[in-house]
């Protein structure tokens, strides 16, 4: 990109969830005007944006008007339909680009792309039918997770297999995914899960945040702790994997890369679980523990500004407030060194991300 878009520029964000909300808040802080496009009138991003379009992602007329109202477009979730990304790319600038979306929308395409870069992933097989599943498991694939290829998130669309199921059980497990095209992944005996959230600019410059150590409950991120309990060499390797993936995609913006840390026979190995072409829940800690947070970093990258300093000044534990957890807001608000973020969602549902809290301590 030639030159950067100055303050008062207009950025369009596809998606009206909490990630869009936090992107909009960061953009506003830089004097940049935000237009949110999303289907949910109650979506938390609309409430904090200068302009809102409430429309479906297949509404070509609304997308065309949206494109005309902005200088650059970005997105806050990876299930943006390819057609919407194509329309925006044709009519305005879209960052990150269509390729990152296409790769991350299909778990088979994603794993093939990553392993094609020489980066290890869990062993996997394509499963199109119940017969495929029975055949692969009876060949001794072992403990595994069956996941839908598309539209899975927060542990949804996943079924665990011990490896000792009989044929009927396998068929009924497959039916639980309602026959959607699936991927079977070997269960990784990980010691811990980490993620790297990083930014890449138009000129290829790359700045990672420190790796976070993540704990999931019921497939949903519960906490991210920084620093992660990994050695400096593993942290460096995690950053290099992330750089390799972002370079290969010609990526512009912030990305999250989730990895498994496997410790075997005294050696540490990293396997990539998945990539998210957007700001990431495991990067929320950067809002209070870093000079520049992931949301501002994404806005800077997309506008062509110099990337900010991702240096971390505090240790931090980010806890997601899921469902009724957010009912403890008053207690958390009174805690020392706790930074509370609530997303303004009026309806509490089990498993719904309502907010998060970053608990800071002196840098170790
Ligand atoms: P995902 O939706 O792929 O991010 O999966 C959600 C969570 O399920 C991960 O963060 C892991 O805790 C667990 N998980 C997913 N895939 C695997 C795997 N192949 N082996 C072990 N655990 C996994």
Image (spheres, rainbow, N blue to C red):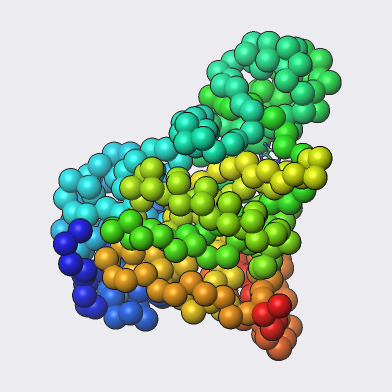
Q: On the picture, is 192 further left or further right than 100? A: right
Vertical relation: 331 (above or below) 172: below
Along the line of sight, which residue is nearer the eye, 361 or 60? 361
The answer to whether one can see residue 201 in this image is: yes
**At which x and y percent is residue 61?**
20, 48
Q: Quadrant of residue 284?
A: bottom right
Q: Quadrant of residue 309?
A: bottom left
Vertical relation: 159 (above or below) 17: above
Q: Residue furthest right?
A: 164
**At which x and y percent is residue 304?**
27, 66
Q: Quadrant of ligand 1?
A: top right
- Image point (27%, 66%), residue name: 303
Q: On the picture, is 117 further left or further right than 161? A: left
Q: On the picture, is 304 further left or further right than 276? A: left
Along the line of sight, which residue is nearer the eye, 57 or 276? 276
Q: How many numbered marks are there?
A: 0
**At which x and y percent is residue 38?**
37, 56
- Image point (60%, 35%), residue name: 121
Along the line of sight, which residue is nearer the eye, 42 or 179? 179
Along the line of sight, which residue is nearer the eye, 161 or 274? 274
Vertical relation: 247 (above or below) 233: above
Q: Quadrant of residue 137?
A: top right
**At which x and y percent is residue 90?**
18, 46
- Image point (16%, 50%), residue name: 91
Position of the N terminus by quadrant: bottom left
């Amino acid at each position: 990109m030639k030159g950067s878009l100055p303050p008062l520029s207009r950025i369009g964000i596809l998606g009206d969830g909490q990630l869009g909300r936090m992107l909009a808040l960061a953009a506003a802080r830089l004097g940049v005007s935000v237009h949110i496009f999303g289907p949910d009138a109650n979506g938390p991003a609309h409430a904090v944006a200068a302009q809102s379009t409430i429309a479906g992602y297949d509404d070509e007329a609304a997308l065309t008007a949206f494109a005309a109202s902005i200088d650059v477009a970005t997105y806050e979730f990876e299930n943006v339909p390819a057609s919407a990304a194509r329309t925006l790319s044709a009519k305005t600038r879209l960052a990150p680009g269509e390729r990152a979306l296409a790769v991350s929308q299909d778990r088979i395409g994603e794993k093939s792309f990553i392993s094609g870069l020489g980066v290890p992933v869990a062993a996997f097989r394509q499963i199109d039918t119940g017969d495929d599943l029975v055949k692969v498991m009876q060949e001794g694939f072992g403990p595994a997770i069956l996941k839908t290829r598309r539209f899975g998130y927060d542990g949804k669309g996943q079924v665990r297999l011990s490896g000792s199921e009989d044929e009927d059980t396998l068929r009924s497990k497959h039916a639980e995914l309602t026959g959607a095209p699936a991927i079977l992944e070997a269960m990784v005996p990980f010691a811990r899960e980490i993620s790297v959230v990083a930014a890449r600019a138009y000129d290829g410059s790359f700045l990672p945040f420190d790796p976070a150590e993540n704990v999931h409950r019921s497939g949903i991120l519960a906490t991210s702790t920084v620093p992660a309990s990994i050695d400096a060499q593993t942290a460096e390797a995690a950053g290099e994997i992330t750089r390799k993936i972002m370079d290969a995609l010609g990526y512009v913006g912030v990305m999250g890369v989730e990895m498994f840390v496997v410790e075997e026979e005294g050696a540490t190995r990293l396997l990539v679980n998945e990539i998210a072409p957007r700001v990431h829940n495991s990067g929320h800690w950067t809002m209070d523990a870093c000079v520049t947070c992931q949301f501002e970093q994404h806005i800077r990258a997309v506008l062509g500004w110099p990337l900010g300093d991702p240096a971390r000044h505090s240790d931090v534990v980010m806890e997601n407030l899921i469902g009724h957890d957010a009912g403890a807001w008053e207690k958390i608000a009174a805690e020392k060194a706790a930074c509370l973020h609530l997303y303004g969602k009026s309806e509490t549902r089990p498993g719904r991300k309502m907010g998060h809290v970053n608990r800071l301590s002196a840098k170790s």
